[in-house]
Amino acid sequence: MREHIRRVQLTGRTTLTISLPKDWVETIGLKPGSIMRLVPRNSLGLILMPEGLKESRREARLLIEGDKEAEALLREIISLYLAGYDIIRLEFSVPHLHLKLYLKENMRKKLMGMEILNESLTEMLLQCFAKHVELPLEDALKRQSELAASMQRDATNSLLLGGRELAEEVIQRDDEVDKLFYFISRQLNLAAELPHVLHELKIENTMACLSYAMVTKAIERIGDHASNIAHTSLNINEKIEEEIAMEIEKLDEQVKNIFLESITVLLKKDSKAANNLIREIEKIKKLYTEVLEKVMARKIDSKTIPLLRGALGDYIRIAEYSADIAEQAIFLSLL
């Protein structure tokens, strides 16, 4: 809808009023006596939300002609999910049994609340049942970070103690971190567009949506690095000597604690604690250098050295992403 300009009118002695745009009133379905919620924002703005009106479901349609690359189609569905569409209709020009099986398997892994309502040879009807009120933003971020931290812990155990099954389980768990990333991103995209979602998620303003989006992406990348450590453990064929293992365990513990602490200061919006945390991360970088030097000084199999170096690099990247999260805590504290 186009922008409307209204002049404030004085009604009676003290009441200030403005008229509502006619086309907006008709679209929303307001009538005399309808209740409006007025929510002041920090930016001096005012959000008007009609009370009791049901939000219409957003629907998208995809026509799949000929041979469609499975990954490309999945990316399109994920994009529609992120954009906040509730219903997605897939119409196939010819039957695609293998393509539909691929979509079913990967949607279960990646998209929270996405279910198949109806299916035929040439159609699939998808609907998202996940609602932001059922898993608020703060709870979703906590769950995502706890999952990523547990992945890091178990990946380290697999690296130092061996255990193929544990490593493979960690790699599979990365799907759960990704699923929460997509869900949180969907929440934030809706909040940036719909004022009532912004209010329900208790987000300060649309600028904060971008900040939280950077945080959930950082957590998703931390999960990827934990998965990388698990992959590395699968490729190391010799037992890591005890002294090196103790150093790696020490690095892992400090990195994991810093990561979880970054989430705490983010949710508290504590800029002082965030700055202290960033200084601590600089100390972790020194520890990383010391551990790397000890690894390089040992007589280790030539195939194992680059693998351990890569795993140590994953730990330091987790610490750097934790610094990024702490920086967003500083930004949010200023809004």
Image (cartoon, rainbow, N blue to C red):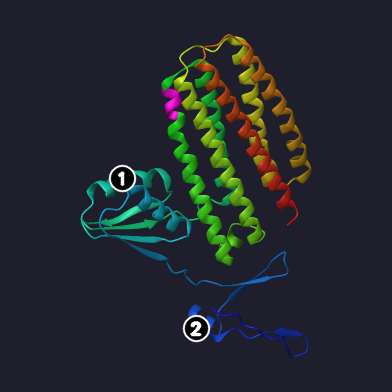
Kindly report which numbered mark, 1 or 2, lies closer to the viewer in this rendering.
Answer: 1
Q: Is residue 1 above or below residue 106?
A: below
Residue 33 location, x and y as percent? Answer: 56, 83
Q: Is residue 110 above or below residue 247?
A: below
- In the picture provided, is 137 more to the left or to the right than 97? right
Q: Residue at x 63, y 39 (%)?
A: 321
Q: Residue furthest front?
A: 302
Q: Residue at x 58, y 8 (%)?
A: 299
Which quadrant of the structure image shows residue 206? bottom right
Q: Amino acid at mark 2?
A: Glu
Q: Residue furthest bottom?
A: 12
What is the tally of numbered marks visible in this picture? Answer: 2
Instruction: Please state which of residues 275 and 317 is positioned toward the viewer in this rendering.
Output: 317
Residue 261 location, x and y as percent? Answer: 68, 36
Instruction: Please state which of residues 226 and 142 is positioned toward the viewer in this rendering.
Output: 226
Q: Amino acid at mark 1?
A: Tyr
How dense is the environment of label 1, judged by Cα within 10 Å: few (below 14), some, or many (20 and up)?
few
Q: Is residue 233 above or below residue 333?
A: above
Q: Is residue 335 visible?
A: yes
The residue pinned by badge 2 equals: 26
Which quadrant of the structure image shows residue 145? top right
How dense is the environment of label 2, judged by Cα within 10 Å: few (below 14), some, or many (20 and up)?
few
The residue pinned by badge 1 equals: 102
Lower position in the chain sequence, tag 1 or tag 2:
2
Q: Which residues are magenta?
A: 165-169
The C terminus lies in quadrant = bottom right
Instruction: Assess whether mark 2 and mark 1 are in contact (beta carbons under 8 angstroms).
Output: no
- In the picture provided, is 209 more to the left or to the right than 94? right
Q: Main secondary structure of the magenta part?
A: helix
